[in-house]
Amino acid sequence: MKITDFILDLLYPRKCVFCGRLMGDEPGRTCSDCRRNLPFVPDGDAKSHGDYYKVCVSCFYYEDKVRDSILNFKFGGRSGYGTEYAKYLAECIENNLKDEFDVITWVPVSKKRYRKRGYDQAKILAEATADILGMKAVRLLDKPVHNKAQSTIDSAEKRRANVMSMYKAVNTDMIKGKRILVIDDIKTTGATLSECSRILLLSEAEEVLCAALAKTRHVDI
Ligand SMILES: [Zn+2]
């Protein structure tokens, strides 16, 4: 352990990002108990397909401690969890999408939500994941308009309508002819990722792939 890490550990004892247990001598921020019992998506179910994206991979099912942890990450100010999540996301991407994309980006939050929350959780996730993969995350999408949170809407059709035309492409010279990987925290119906992919394809992306930290096991809305 580096001396700076040692001092940081004394000042801010590391806790498991999933259950809050003190890590003690264990490395990282996932305790051995969670590592064994988290709802990992098995290989056979890791990939799903959408209208505008070729494939979306996910590491976890959005349930139990993963759900609690991501809610803390998004709404509880725990932006630091992103670096731990990124380890799982990077591994999942390496296993399923190796050499299939040229650029990494993320699903952005609106300015209004950014001001309220103080951070953009998917950007944090994308930057930390890109870092592990030896790349840099690039902003390719903006969300000029504020809409209702997808999590408050209970039908797939209304979710699609809620995100329609909410995103716009930026840095378009980085989109044209590129295979783009879009990162987000949670995938439910895939409506947001699909809309972001549509916008990227309109700016002449060659193809779009997606990676979500967690997905719902059944889309029953
Ligand atoms: Zn734990």
Image (cartoon, helix red, strand yellow):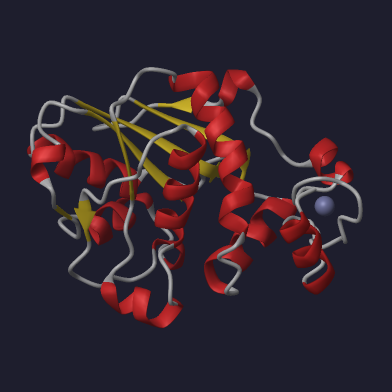
Q: Is residue 208 visible?
A: yes
Looking at this view, is 43 or 122 the one in front? 122
Is 129 located above or below residue 91 in the figure? Answer: below
Residue 116, located in which quarter of the rendered image? bottom left
Relative height, residue 142 to residue 52 (above, below): below
**Numbered-mark total:** 0
Write the residue at 39% across / 61% down.
150
- Residue 36 lies, with reference to residue 145, above or below; the image says above
Report whether 106 appears left or right of 46.
left
Residue drawn at x 66%, y 25% is 42
Spot occupied by residue 210 in the image (x, y as percentages of width and height): 38, 35
Residue positioned 51% across, 23% down in the render? 94
In the displayed orientation, state which residue is furthest to the bottom: 116
Which residue is nearer to you in this view: 216 or 67?
A: 67
Is residue 217 visible in the rendered image? The answer is no
In the figure, is residue 209 to the left or right of 57? left
Q: Is residue 29 above or below residue 49?
A: below
Of residue 59 and residue 162, the one placed in the foreground of this image is 59
Q: Position of residue 208 (x, y in %)?
A: 26, 30
Rendering coords of residue 63 (x, y %)? 67, 50
**Image quarter for residue 5?**
bottom right
- How far across and how far down the image is residue 80, in percent? 60, 62
Left/right placement of residue 61 relative to residue 90 reads right
Residue sitting at x 19%, y 56%: 167
